[in-house]
Amino acid sequence: MARVALVTGGMGGLGEAICIKMAALGYHVVTTYSPGNTKAKDWLATMEQQGFKFRAFPCDVADYDSAQQCVAQIVNEIGPVDVLVNNAGITRDMTFKKMGKTDWDAVMKTNLDSVFNMTKPVCDGMTDRGWGRVINISSVNGQKGAFGQTNYSAAKAGMHGFTKALALEVARKGVTVNTISPGYIGTKMVMAIPQEVLESKIIPQIPMSRLGKPEEVAGLVAYLASDEAAFLTGANIAINGGQHMY
Ligand code: NDP
């Protein structure tokens, strides 16, 4: 039977590429969207036209109860989650001087609390079945820091602390937990940055002189989810064109 892969935020730039890659590999792909997202049906229809029949469930990953209900519904309607990709995330960039508590809380809840909220209802099932993969999408800025991103850098760094600790706890049960830290990836969000800024400020920071492709991140997710990656756990894998090496 096909393994179930749950990708949070699968309708976003990176999430979509991850969903497509996992579906192409034969996973039963399920995704989530924010309860207020009015474009979810359109996205599902577009994907279906491209040959991908995804299931999508409303879920506010920042909210514990919403996450529990969402996973319970997925398990009930589709089956136990074998691969969880914690991909949903937001930014609220501003200098620390300007940052208010709501900007801090929004980013911490959506990017870090969400990892707890979504992993909690799937982890015991994975250890009971003796197989599972938790893949957390962090960011280069969690390691390197970034001007205007105290909230985002803290949340993204926190994901890796979570990864290492949980990896230790579930290592003997066939479950791996890893972090992927992408650099600048050519998603719609990044491509919306004016070309001039991309060329003068961003690309020069990247030794490969280009943005990453969402498919390159998706390929790494697919590897971490595979049986071949069974010995790889607690890692933080950089995928940033050489922008930041650690
Ligand atoms: P997008 O903004 O395109 O997608 C983010 C996704 O997260 C959306 O599908 C959105 O769903 C979902 N989301 C946001 N808040 C919530 C919430 N409260 N509950 C449920 N879903 C939510 O971003 P990217 O695809 O670019 O980024 C994906 C991940 O990769 C993020 O974690 C980001 O931090 C990380 N990343 C991205 C990089 C890049 O260059 N693009 C670089 C490094 C890291 P909806 O639209 O329904 O709200």
Image (cartoon, rainbow, N blue to C red):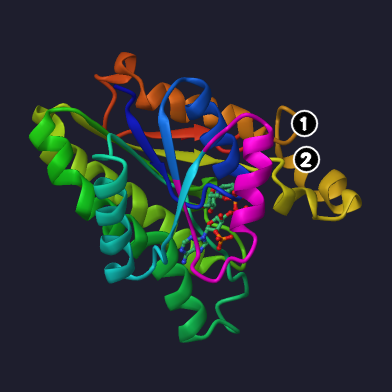
Say what amino acid the circle numbered 1 marks: Ser
In the rendered image of this protein, does residue 217 appear above or below residue 148?
above
Q: Amino acid at mark 2?
A: Ile
Counting labels gives 2
Q: Is residue 44 magenta?
A: yes
Please give the residue where the numbered disc 1 appears in the rendered image: 209
In the picture of the structure, the residue carrying the numbered disc 2 is 203
Q: Is residue 74 above or below residue 95?
A: above
Q: Are marks 2 and 1 in contact (CB under 8 Å)?
A: yes
Percent across and percent down for residue 235 are 33, 33
Say which residue appears at 70% left-offset and 30% top-offset: 207
Q: Is residue 11 above or below residue 185?
A: below
Q: Residue furthest right?
A: 196
What whole-number distance in Å separates the C-alpha atoms at marks 2 and 1? Answer: 5 Å
Given residues 147 and 22, the one toward you in this image is: 22
Q: Which residues are magenta?
A: 31-53
Residue at (42% x, 62% y) in the render: 154
The front one of 206 and 111 is: 111
Q: Is residue 225 left or right of residue 233?
A: right
Any magenta on residue 138?
no
> Residue 194 at what x, y percent from top left?
87, 55
